[in-house]
């Protein structure tokens, strides 16, 4: 679950969030799991997905990446899709993930989904300003 928040702190209630992820065994687009989801933001900028926690996948040089979800955001005032990643709080592989390590240490927390009661994770996406989510070039 999460919210998309504009640079001025207001919720983006007309955005679109898409996710792509591997299955629990680290496979993309497996016959039993497509790994894709799309959700429009609602009142308060909220969105949610019900999915499984992904497994680790190989990195660019064959190293192991931490379990993560690829996330894109489209919204008013955004001229091109914004790409980011969602990592999971408490995941030991976060410390060695090759992509996460490219992000300055003081900004990595913008990519970490926090565990909530009931096993859910919360991941808010801030488009600009204070605590802006780290976005990657596609």
Image: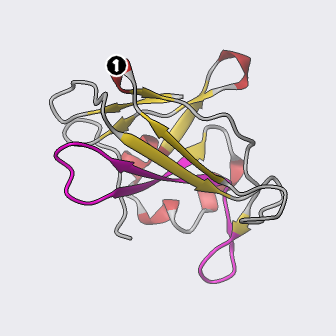
In the rendered image, residue 87, in percent from the top left (x then y), is placed at: 58, 47
State which quarter of the image contains the C terminus: bottom left
In the rendered image, residue 46, in percent from the top left (x then y), is placed at: 42, 25
Q: Which residue is mark 1?
A: 44
Vertical comparison of 7 with 87: above or below? above
Vertical comparison of 133 with 58: above or below? above
Instruction: Identify the residue at image location x=34%, y=68%.
Output: 137
Residue 83 among those drawn in magenta: yes
Q: Residue 93 vs residue 3: left or right?
A: right
Residue 105 among those drawn in magenta: no
The quadrant holding residue 95 is bottom right
Instruction: Identify the residue at image location x=81%, y=52%.
Output: 24
Question: How is this picture coloured?
Answer: secondary structure
Q: Residue 48 vs residue 130: left or right?
A: right
Vertical comparison of 118 with 25: above or below? above
In the rendered image, residue 55, in percent from the top left (x then y), is placed at: 76, 55
> SS of the residue at dot 1?
helix
Instruction: Identify the residue at image location x=54%, y=28%.
Output: 1
In the rendered image, residue 113, in percent from the top left (x then y), is placed at: 55, 36
The quadrant holding residue 62 is bottom right
Residue at the limit of the structure toward the bottom, as seen here: 61
- Magenta part of the chain: 58-86
From the viewer's side, name the closer residue of 85 and 64.
Answer: 85
Number of residue marks? 1
Determine crowd level at label 1: few under 14, some 14-19, many 20+ residues with C-alpha closer than 10 A.
some
From the viewer's side, name the closer residue of 97 and 68.
Answer: 68
Residue at the limit of the structure toward the top, as seen here: 117
Instruction: Identify the residue at image location x=42%, y=33%.
Output: 124
From the viewer's side, name the closer residue of 55 and 79.
Answer: 79
């Amino acid at each position: 679950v999460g919210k998309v928040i504009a640079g001025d702190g207001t919720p983006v209630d007309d955005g679109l969030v898409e996710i792509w992820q591997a299955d629990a065994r680290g496979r993309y687009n497996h016959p039993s799991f497509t790994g894709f989801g799309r959700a429009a933001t609602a009142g308060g900028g909220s969105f949610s997905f019900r999915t499984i926690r992904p497994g680790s996948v190989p990195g660019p040089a064959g190293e192991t990446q931490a379990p993560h979800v690829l996330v894109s955001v489209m919204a008013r005032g955004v001229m091109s899709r914004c790409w980011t990643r969602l990592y999971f709080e408490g995941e030991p592989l976060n410390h060695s993930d090759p992509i996460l390590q490219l992000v300055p240490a003081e900004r990595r927390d913008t990519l970490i989904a926090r565990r909530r009661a009931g096993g859910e994770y919360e991941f808010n996406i801030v488009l600009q300003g204070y605590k802006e989510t780290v976005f990657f070039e596609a």
